[in-house]
Amino acid sequence: MVFRNRDNRMPKSDTSAKPKASALWWSRPPESLRYGVVVLSIVATVISLWWMDAVFHAAPHVSMFLCAIMFSAWFGGVRPGLLAIALALLAFKYYFLPPTHSWHVEAAQLPRLIVFALSALFVGSLSAAQRSATESLRRARDDQQKINEELRGEILERKHAEDALRASEQVTRGQAEALAQNLDILATAPAPENLIGQMLSTIGRLLNAQSVTLWLLDKQNGSLVLRAAAEGKNFAAADSEHPFIKDASAWKEDKVLQETVFTGVPAVVEEIEGDPRVSNPIRDYFRSKGTKKFLAIPTLIEGDVKGFIGIRHGDRPSYRPEEIELAQALAHQAMFAIQLNQFAEQSQQAAVLEERNRMARDIHDTLAQGFMGVIIQLE
């Protein structure tokens, strides 16, 4: 059987893991990439401002540097943001603030440079704070998702435990009900043969089966003997068309029954049409009876297989483990009835033998007395 996870579902495909990996890459890029983006953004801003000045003769606008700083701080974090601010200040002073191409700062341009630096710090801090808040929110979302998964796993485990408890309760209830009915049968059955048939009827009713048959194994001849059968609540006579009735040794060709008899474990056939273990005669016979599924439960006495109980079903869901366990328990009770029947037959035979011996003794005594009288008269 294919092992699944605890909620009885197959694991998710890897496609769901790819977006998570991509999101993780964007939220935590490598350090070299973060600093590289900072340098590229500032260089791209300087080139853009040069191009605008050359083509449109437009004065450089600090908003483009602020946008580059904002993007750098959002993408790289605090330290890459500070690097972006420093590079932007240097580029703004060297290329666009008079005197250009010089590091000398005139007193008249100092307030403008200070305002630009304060604006850059403010924008960078906001962008870095937004990134930090975004990362905190993502971590909180990941933690919440982990907690939800753990809770879901605990709920599923509890559900499976409840299902197992209900299944065990169902088996126990079925065994208790069957035992109570079988005790009633033992107390009211007028004949031992009816006792076994009524027990098979109980099995068929509790498992909602088409029919239940009890086959005993004659190990000397290697053949099967039909002991009793029941269809629903009624006893069933032997079907002359059954392959095992026609040929008592035909069961040796059926791998399902071989598995049951030689291993002593129940055999489950979920699809008679597609199960290669089922022999062709049995498959044809079951097809004619509308049988789709089949259970073979071995009957054991002190670990020795004495036969099996065949339980036939039509269309129904797959057999659950608790149903197979219940069928085993009922098969043990049916075998107990067989033993009681055998004890009754042995007791009856012992009583007949004892009566026969008593009559022989009486006849012997009577004849002895008669012969003694004849002898006396002859003398």
Image (tube, rainbow, N blue to C red):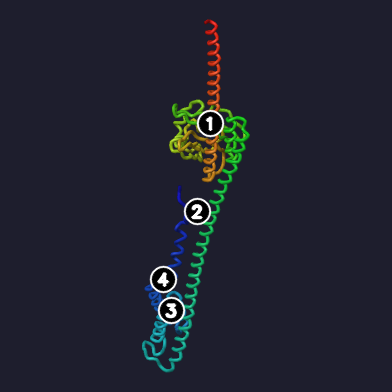
- List the residue tagged with mark 1: 343
Mark 4 and 1 residues: CB-CB less than 8 Å, in contact?
no
Could you classify mark 3 by the number of other residues whose Cα lies within 10 Å: few (under 14), some (14-19), or many (20 or more)?
some
Q: Tell me: residue 139, above or below residue 59.
A: above
State the residue at coordinates (45%, 70%): 27
Q: Is residue 287 left or right of residue 37?
A: right
First in residue order: circle 2 vs circle 4: 2
C-alpha distance separating marks 4 and 3:
14 Å
Q: Earlier in the sequence, mark 3 or mark 1?
A: 3
Q: Which mark is residue 78?
A: 3
For disc 2, the marked residue is 9
Q: To which residue does mark 4 refer? A: 29
Q: Say if 139 sits above or below 332 in the image.
A: below
Q: Which numbered disc, 3 or 2, marks the residue that appears first in the sequence?
A: 2
Q: Is residue 11 above or below residue 130?
A: above
Measuring from the top left, give residue 250's x and y in whole percent.
46, 29
Of the residues shown, which amino acid type is indicated by label 4? Pro
How far apart are the alpha carbons under marks 3 and 2? 44 Å
Residue kind at label 3, given as amino acid type = Val
Contact between marks 4 and 3 (CB within 8 A): the answer is: no
From the viewer's side, name the closer residue of 319 and 110: 319
Earlier sequence position, callout 4 versus callout 3: 4
Q: CA distance from mark 4 to mark 1?
A: 84 Å
> Can residue 61 be seen in this snapshot?
no
Do the residues bearing badges 3 and 1 touch, measured as CB atoms within 8 Å?
no
Q: Circle 3 — which element?
A: helix
